[in-house]
Image (cartoon, rainbow, N blue to C red):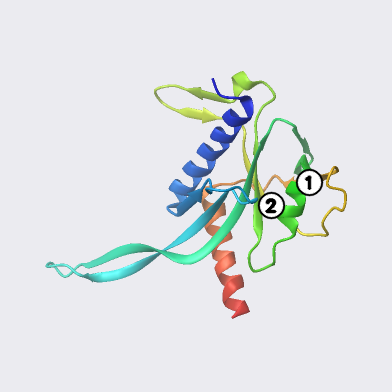
């Protein structure tokens, strides 16, 4: 039997994997060594490969080069505060998130699970239900000097991690990068 934290990690990876698949993008997850980045969303581009015998265009897909790194967290210690989801991040996590340059941000992806582990996942022939969901945020600000402290993070509930949201984030990143060069 795996630990509760490994179970939570696996469920959050499952959520992100399913979301990336539905967005039809590539996903790199679980680096060989942990240096604060848990995964990367990688945008795809369609390239004309040629014309088939019937005169139809044939395409292949390649990574476009646009990417967004993310730090994946999973917790039962969260709450709704009006239009936001509130969660306390440890200083090390917070500092990792805010210390990246603007051209290469580190997105927080926060999986919010119910308090009761029996409510986390249910499966039937018709559906697989994983409760609750993931939210995302790009955090900015000064780092915390005290590594033993924490920072209350409030993420807008509108920042629900969905396939469309991931595609929008990648499109915004592409636009941001194009304006820098």
Q: CA distance from mark 1 to mark 2?
A: 9 Å
As drawn, the residue found furthest toward the left would be: 53
On screen, residue 94 above or below 124: below
- Image quadrant assignment for residue 55: bottom left
Locate residue 79, reporting x and y percent: 76, 34
Q: Residue at x 59, y 25 (%)?
A: 120
Q: Tell whether 164 sits left or right of 52.
A: right
Mark drawn on residue 137: 2
User: Would you call the spot at circle 2 few (<14 residues within 10 Å), some (14-19), or many (20 or more)?
Assistant: some
Locate residue 139, reporting x and y percent: 74, 56
Q: Residue at x 20, y 67 (%)?
A: 56
Nearer to me, 145 or 105 = 145
Q: Secondary structure at mark 1?
A: strand
Q: Is residue 131 visible?
A: no
Q: Tell whether 116 sits left or right of 88.
A: left
Locate residue 166, reporting x and y percent: 55, 54
On screen, residue 74 above or below 170: above
Q: Tell whether 77 sits left or right of 113.
A: right
- Image quadrant assignment for residue 87: top right
Q: Residue at x 61, y 47 (%)?
A: 34
Nearer to me, 9 or 172 = 9
- Are discs 1 and 2 less than 8 Å apart at CB? yes
Mark drawn on residue 153: 1
User: Would you call the spot at circle 1 few (<14 residues within 10 Å), some (14-19), or many (20 or more)?
Assistant: some
């Amino acid at each position: 039997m795996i630990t509760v934290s490994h179970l939570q990690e696996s469920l959050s990876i499952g959520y992100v994997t399913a979301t990336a698949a539905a967005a039809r993008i590539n996903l790199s997850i679980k680096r060989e060594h942990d240096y604060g980045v848990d995964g990367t969303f990688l945008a795809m581009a369609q390239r004309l490969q040629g014309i088939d015998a019937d005169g139809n265009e044939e395409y292949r897909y390649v990574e476009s080069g646009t990417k967004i790194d993310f730090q994946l967290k999973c917790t039962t210690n969260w709450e709704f505060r009006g239009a936001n989801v509130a969660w306390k991040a440890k200083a090390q996590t917070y500092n990792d998130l805010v210390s990246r340059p603007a051209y290469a941000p580190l997105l927080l992806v926060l999986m919010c699970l119910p308090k009761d582990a029996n409510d986390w996942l249910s499966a039937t022939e018709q559906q697989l239900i994983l409760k609750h969901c993931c939210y995302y945020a790009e955090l900015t600000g000064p780092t915390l000097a005290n590594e033993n402290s924490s920072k209350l993070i409030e993420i807008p509930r509108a920042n629900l991690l969905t396939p469309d949201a991931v595609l929008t984030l990648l499109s915004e990143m592409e636009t941001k990068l194009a304006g820098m060069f």
